Image (spheres, grey):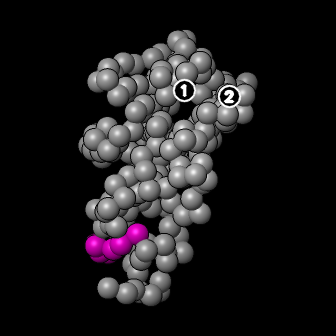
Amino acid sequence: MTLATHDLDPRATLRMTIEEFDQLPDRKQYELVHGELVERRMGTESDWIGATIAYILETFNRRTGLGYVFGEADYALDPSDRHHFRRPDASFVLASRFPDGKLPLTRARLAPDLAVEVISPNDLAGEMNEKIKEYKRLGVRLIWVVFPASRTVDVYCADGRVYTLEEDQPISGEDVLPGFTSPVTDFFPKARR
């Protein structure tokens, strides 16, 4: 089905392809989930936290050269599915995973090694749980779910371990980012006076 951009109503239920999605003028506000537009409900604080985490990861990555850090990059997690992609708030991919070590010009057709999701006030628990299950099923090796309200991070590891870190604890890159560590508190805004 071919749709002109002006014919698309983001509130309509359509089974669109990634190629049709790419024609939308406001596509940064959505993910494509099984052919349906799903609005990303990112709040200002959550956006800032995602950018901060990407910065912290990139600072480490500049020293190690392990791969690439992204903020809100699109991932076609299952390359055979033309109706589905996700956009974590921050992510990391080992350089060796890209063919010939080159970044794709369009969305990555692989799962990131690390996916970071920052919870916004409007996020629904069921939707986030579904996203975590999908990440795990499709090969994301490390997932951080960041909760600004409680200033905690839930960590999901490829070996099945799940644990929660408080803001006074350090977070590590496990075997995905060996040698990476950061105080969880650095992910969150400092109290303003």
Residue at the image point whose x is 47% and y is 16% from the top: 166
Report the span colored magenta: 12-18
Residue at point 43% right, 51% down? 110
Q: Is residue 55 above or below residue 78?
A: above
Q: Position of residue 2 (x, y in %)?
A: 37, 87
In the picture provided, is 193 more to the left or to the right than 91? right
Q: Residue at x 58, y 42 (%)?
A: 95
| 13 drawn magenta | yes
Residue 24 rendering spot, x and y as whole percentages? 49, 75
Foreground: 190 or 59?
59
Which residue bears the numbered disc 2? 64
Q: Position of residue 128 (x, y in %)?
A: 33, 42
Residue 174 horizontal side relative to residue 77, left or right: right
Q: Helix or strand or loop: what does disc 2 sit on?
A: helix
- Left or right placement of residue 74 versus residue 45 in this view: left
Q: Is residue 184 visible?
A: no
- Judging by the rendered image, the residue that carries numbered circle 1 is 177
Disc 2 marks a residue whose amino acid type is: Thr
The residue depicted at 40 percent of the width and 25 percent of the height is 155
What amino acid is found at the position of numbered circle 1 in the picture?
Leu
Residue 82 visible in the shown view: yes
Q: Extreme top residue here?
A: 168
